[in-house]
Image (cartoon, helix red, strand yellow):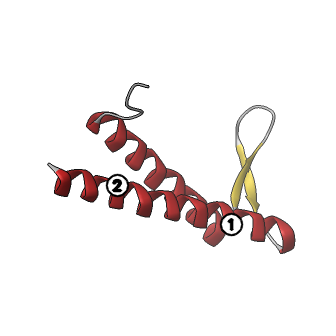
């Protein structure tokens, strides 16, 4: 089986995961911007209850992925 990631691909994945985590955190703090059918901003939708909990879970998953990918990179460096 081919190796799943190269150093460049892993860096991109870590960066994209950071971006996703930052975006989720921003949405939790400031709400999700809503747009009209024409793509114009019309306000901010604030999450509550189950929707907020779901967004928090996704944010925590993203943080976990970042942690594990960072640890993986450290292990690869130590093994060399």
Q: Is residue 19 above or below residue 13?
A: below
* Residue 16: quarter of image: top left
Say which residue appears at 42% left-offset and 33% top-offset: 4
Which element is circle 2 on? helix
Q: Earlier in the sequence, mark 2 or mark 1?
A: 1
Q: Quadrant of the N terminus?
A: top left
Q: Toward the viewer: 23 or 7?
A: 7
Gap in angstroms between the C-alphas marked 2 and 1: 22 Å
State the image coordinates of residue 76 (x, y, percent, origin top left): 25, 50
State the image coordinates of residue 15 (x, y, percent, origin top left): 38, 48
In this rendering, position of residue 5 left or right of residue 78: right
Mark 1, Cα crowd under 10 Å, few <14 / some 14-19 / many 20+, is few
Residue 15 appears in the rendering: yes
Say which residue appears at 57% left-offset and 64% top-offset: 26
Q: How many marks?
A: 2
The residue that disc 1 covers is: 57
The residue that disc 2 covers is: 72
Q: Residue at the far top: name it.
A: 2
Say which residue appears at 27% left-offset and 57% top-offset: 75
Q: Quick check: marks 2 and 1 in contact, CB under 8 Å?
A: no
State the image coordinates of residue 47 (x, y, percent, origin top left): 78, 67
Q: Residue at the far left: name it.
A: 80
In this rendering, position of residue 13 left or right of residue 43: left
* Residue 37: quarter of image: top right
Task: Kindly report which numbered mark, 2 or 1, lies closer to the viewer in this rendering.
Answer: 2
């Amino acid at each position: 089986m081919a190796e799943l990631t190269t150093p460049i691909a892993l860096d991109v994945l870590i960066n994209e995961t950071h971006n996703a985590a930052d975006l989720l955190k921003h949405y939790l703090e400031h709400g999700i911007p809503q747009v009209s059918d024409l793509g114009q901003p019309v306000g901010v939708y604030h999450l509550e209850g189950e929707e907020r909990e779901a967004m928090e879970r996704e944010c925590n998953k993203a943080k976990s992925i970042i942690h594990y990918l960072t640890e993986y990179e450290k292990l690869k460096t130590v093994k060399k």
